[in-house]
């Protein structure tokens, strides 16, 4: 589905989490760019930075900045640069999650303290950290969108500590929505069905998860990147102006089914 330009004309947004062309963050990037937004993309390290710069070549005057969400100093530097270049921010897409590979197999019971800490720091706390940095740039209001998954509310085999981190992320969405609502800033999450991304490749048995989703979802199909991109556009635009603190499921209806 193609969205005509103009919906986000004059708006400026930050997308955190583009890794490659399969990234859900890239699907959202394409949709908001089509709608007229000027974008800033961040990258965690130089290896990923090469991918981001290559993808951003087709965007209109993008900002490309380094930012590891696990580093407070890098978050401060990136947002300082956005303030200097733009002076404001209209929306932010947080599409970052990570847990060590060994924590995404076997039993949740065996999760180490360090793996638990890392998963929550990168996958949940980082939303609060970047929202805190973004809020002063959203003096006229704005929208913050993050990405969750059904494993935050149900037990998904091998999702383990990431599911617990997503539960924390969804709770963070509600608390941040309450904190930032008086400033006119909305905070929401998209819970997408399983999609073949770089992050998903680290989950043991992901292929079986995809097959199960396809056979159980009412729409009898995989979730695709464009569908999530359209949902992201809806939430960051004025079309979603009355929605905050919510989790929007984009999973073909899988979440309504008894498993």
Image (tube, grey):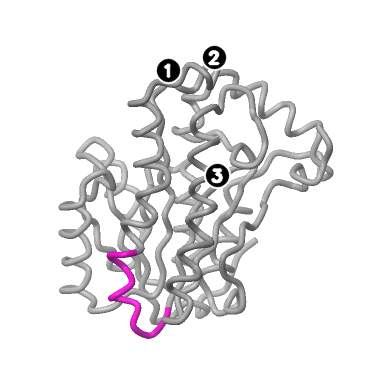
Judged by its main secondary structure, the magenta piece is helix
Q: Quadrant of the C terminus?
A: top right
In the image, is residue 157 above or below residue 187? Answer: above
> Cβ–Cβ below 8 Å for labels 2 and 1?
yes
Question: Which mark is first along the chain, 3 or 2?
Answer: 2
Label 3: how many residues lie within 10 Å, few (<14), some (14-19) or many (20+)?
Answer: many
Q: Quadrant of the N terminus?
A: bottom right
- Left of 67 or right of it: where is 256? right
Please name which of the two marks, 1 or 3, marks the residue nearer to the observer.
3
Q: According to the image, label 1 marks what residue?
A: 102
Task: Identify the mark at residue 213; answer none if there is no mark.
Answer: none
Can you give x and y, in whole percent of width and height, for residue 85 in the image?
18, 73
Q: Which residues are magenta?
A: 132-141
Q: Give the number of callouts.
A: 3
Task: Identify the mark at residue 167; answer none if there is no mark.
Answer: 3
Residue at the (60%, 61%) spot, across then down: 230
Q: According to the image, label 2 marks what residue?
A: 106
Label 2: how many residues lie within 10 Å, few (<14), some (14-19) or many (20+)?
Answer: some
Instruction: For marks 2 and 1, give the CA distance.
Output: 8 Å
């Amino acid at each position: 589905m193609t969205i005509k330009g103009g919906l986000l004309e004059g708006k400026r947004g930050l997308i955190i989490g583009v890794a490659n062309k399969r990234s859900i963050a890239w699907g959202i990037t394409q949709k908001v760019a089509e709608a007229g937004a000027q974008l800033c993309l961040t990258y965690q390290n130089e290896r990923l930075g090469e991918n981001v710069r290559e993808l951003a070549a087709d965007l209109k005057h993008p900002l490309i900045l380094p930012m590891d969400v696990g580093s407070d100093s890098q978050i401060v530097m990136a947002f300082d640069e956005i303030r200097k270049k733009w002076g404001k921010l209209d929306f932010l897409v947080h599409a970052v999650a990570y847990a060590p590979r060994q924590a995404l197999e076997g039993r949740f019971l065996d999760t180490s303290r360090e793996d638990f800490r890392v998963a929550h720091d990168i996958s949940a706390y980082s939303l609060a950290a970047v929202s805190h940095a973004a809020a002063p740039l959203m003096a006229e209001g704005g929208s913050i969108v993050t990405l969750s998954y059904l494993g935050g509310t149900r037990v998904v085999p091998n999702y383990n500590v990431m599911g617990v981190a997503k539960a924390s992320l969804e709770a963070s969405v509600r608390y941040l929505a309450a904190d930032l609502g008086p400033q006119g800033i909305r905070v929401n999450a998209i819970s997408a069905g399983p999609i073949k991304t770089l992050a998903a490749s680290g989950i043991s048995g992901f292929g079986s998860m995809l097959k199960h989703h396809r056979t159980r979802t009412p729409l009898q199909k995989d979730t695709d990147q464009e569908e999530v991109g359209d949902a992201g556009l809806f939430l960051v635009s004025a079309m979603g102006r009355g929605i905050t603190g919510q989790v929007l499921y984009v999973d073909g209806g899988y979440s309504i089914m008894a498993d």
